[in-house]
Amino acid sequence: MPKIVDKAAKRREILEAAIATFAQKGYHAAKMADIAVAAGMGKGTLYEYFPTKEALPKEIFDLFFAGLDAQLVTLKRSELPPIEIILQGIQLSFADKDEFAVVNPLIMELLGSKALDESLGLSRYFEGWLERLSQFFADTIRAGQEARQINSTIHADAFARMLVSVIDGMGLHYCMFQVDPAFFQLQYQELETMIRHRFLAGNMP
Amino acid sequence: MPKIVDKAAKRREILEAAIATFAQKGYHAAKMADIAVAAGMGKGTLYEYFPTKEALPKEIFDLFFAGLDAQLVTLKRSELPPIEIILQGIQLSFADKDEFAVVNPLIMELLGSKALDESLGLSRYFEGWLERLSQFFADTIRAGQEARQINSTIHADAFARMLVSVIDGMGLHYCMFQVDPAFFQLQYQELETMIRHRFLAGNMP
Amino acid sequence: MPKIVDKAAKRREILEAAIATFAQKGYHAAKMADIAVAAGMGKGTLYEYFPTKEALPKEIFDLFFAGLDAQLVTLKRSELPPIEIILQGIQLSFADKDEFAVVNPLIMELLGSKALDESLGLSRYFEGWLERLSQFFADTIRAGQEARQINSTIHADAFARMLVSVIDGMGLHYCMFQVDPAFFQLQYQELETMIRHRFLAGNMP
Amino acid sequence: MPKIVDKAAKRREILEAAIATFAQKGYHAAKMADIAVAAGMGKGTLYEYFPTKEALPKEIFDLFFAGLDAQLVTLKRSELPPIEIILQGIQLSFADKDEFAVVNPLIMELLGSKALDESLGLSRYFEGWLERLSQFFADTIRAGQEARQINSTIHADAFARMLVSVIDGMGLHYCMFQVDPAFFQLQYQELETMIRHRFLAGNMP
DNA sequence: TATGAATGAGCGTTCATTCAT
DNA sequence: AATGAATGAACGCTCATTCAT
């Protein structure tokens, strides 16, 4: 009988090695040989589990965006007031900064490389996610406006989309440049305060 | 008698070809041959003006960040009230979205590629710029606070750094995903309104 | 207690799988994994019975040429007149066209691949067989000439060798290109008639 | 100004190196590096002239079959009596045995390798040629029969197709096994005599 | 000065073979 | 005995860079 192997576990090992290697060198500079070394296996073994180098980021993104979507679902079930839901949504985005810090530069590198973006369908992937998140924020804002908890002069769709860009920008800066976590916390506080002011403004005549 | 050539003009031509090609295909997928074709010259000629492929983005960034710094200087000379200076600073960042739209994905791709980031010193470059911009915003905020035009509970440094991330996030999204310019304008309006609210909040008792 | 296995049967199974796979894809394109699947066993098992991939065609040829030689022996025992012996020899070559159709392209592919030809000794193998067949034909012709049943102006050795090439050419074309069996039968008739004419020419003054 | 190169000449050089290398080692065993060495250039240069390894045999076959077709055209223009035309056609096939000796094993190897056969369209190529040659022989035979120079009991199409197989078989054997040219000449004589007998048989009652 | 033909180090990928189970 | 997971040598191909003209 042949060696018995937990194929799923091995996939995960390889994926982790790939993530680590991509994080360290970036996608283009990471050679399959590097990943194999990082995974503690022979080059050939990688190809038993993934058909090409491109399949690695593809799978990483699958998992990553699935995780984001799962969080969104959790959030949707929340019973909090609209303002708090939105703020929690933002915080959630910053919560797993570590994972984010690894995946995000990878996304950036591959989004920049048009050919890879295309072949991985990364843009559509990403845009889909942004769309869903925007939609969720916009719906929540509208709900808040109807409940007279959020300033009704706010353009829900535009504000929501702006918020998504804002979150992404901050997340990106956090993980691409070494921002001190404490300082980042301060930045978040300023963002939160600003948003609260805007949501409540005019509600207190 | 040697042919008389406007070296500087040729450098610019090459650089523009490089920018166009990088914009279209990304850095890694763009071959030197592609750039030569775009520039309407032979491959060898490129090497008369730039020693390596890497030298092209290096120079592109030199020009780009020099331009940003120049704008910053202009802004600094402005006699407007602090709030308006900041809003103008933001608007300025979005003004040349076209140039931005080309350079930014390039920056992202190369920041992701650690090896290139390193060898181009891109991170330090970028961080320097972010630092200067943050500093400028922070200084302006403090000036506004001293002049009692900006809410004094704002943490100037944190808010400024947050603002920089926000600007970058919005610019990035604008140029990486096809955002309708009119819709982007709405987003900007929401951002501006939110900032104004925050700056003025508590100043109008 | 070790499992009792019919080693010889298993060898045959593998060989048949190999033949089928080689026939379908050719030697170079056939992977050991394909053969294992065709044989309904694991890749490793193949190596219990055959030391290398090369050993498979080697054995196939062993069996094939042994079969041919056996037929030659049968033919030699025949008591028919020389002309009929030769014609039977030709027909025999075309009889098991199915086996032929599988083995022949394989032979061709490997003869073309000099390295494999060398290491399998295929050429010598083949030449040996051609030699024996030619010899047999030549001897039969000479016998016919002595018996005044075959035109004595025929150069027995040259004619015999020519005949062997002719048989091979027709067999090859039959199995490499889709020749309609009925049309092939017509071709054979023409060949037979031509040979008879030649053998008898001048014997009927 | 760049190096001035006779591109067509270089293509020919490469092709000749490829032919020589394929002849020596066969297609599969011949590495691009080997061909480069044989051509006295770097590996990369090969790819300036041919996009893939497969393109090499493709071009070799293009030239080879174009040559055969040209010979056929020449033959068609001939004013000789039908029998002589056919015999000349056969001789012509054997004339450039040297080129044949190189190309034929290559054809055999690639025809055997189903995948390559497919992607080179070799079979259709080959079958087309066989078809044209058969057709030509058949037409000539029919013309001979009408002119009462060729035995009218011959089935022109079947005989012609048989002849093509015969020619190919002899050519193949000549170049795959070291046949002494003088002995081959004798074989040809036997073939010619046999054909003449058949063509004339019954015409001389 | 300008060129593009030439180059070869380097990478992704394949697959015959091995060997732990 | 049987297996198939693991392996790495080997190969086709790319493309930044060089240099003869």
Image (cartoon, coloured by chain):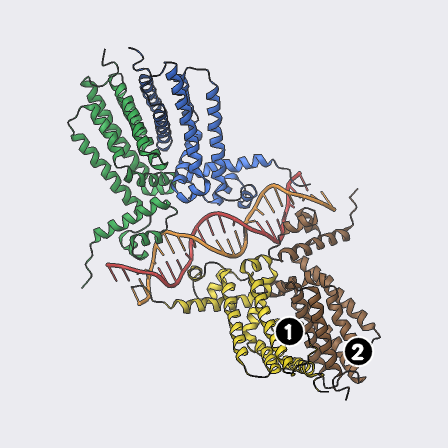
Chain colours: A blue, B green, C brown, D yellow, E red, F orange
Task: Estimate how packed mark 2 is, as few (under 14), some (14 to 19) or many (20 or more) residues with alpha carbons within 10 Å.
Answer: many
Q: CA distance from mark 2 to mark 1?
A: 27 Å
Q: Is residue D87 above or below residue B160?
A: below
Instruction: Identify the residue at the far right of this view.
Output: C79
Residue A104 lies, in percent from the top left, at: 41, 34
Q: Position of residue C89 (x, y in %)?
A: 76, 72
The x and y percentages for residue B92 are 24, 33
Report which residue position mark 1 lands on. D160
Q: How many marks?
A: 2
Residue A90 vertical position relative to residue F18 in the rendered view, above or below: above
Check the image and report above or below for C58 versus B64. below
Q: Regarding mark 1 in the picture, which secondary structure is present there? A: helix
The three-letter code of the residue at mark 2 reads Pro
Residue B156 lies, with reference to residue B132, above or below; the image says above
Task: Report whether residue B121 is seen.
Answer: no
Instruction: Name the image quarter holding residue B75.
Output: top left
Disc 1 crowd rating (10 Å Cα; few below 14, some 14-19, many 20+) is: many
The answer to whether any part of residue D203 appears in the image is yes
SS class, disc 2: helix
Determine the chain carrying the residue at label 1: D
User: Of the numbered discs in the image, which one, if any, rests on residue C82?
Assistant: 2
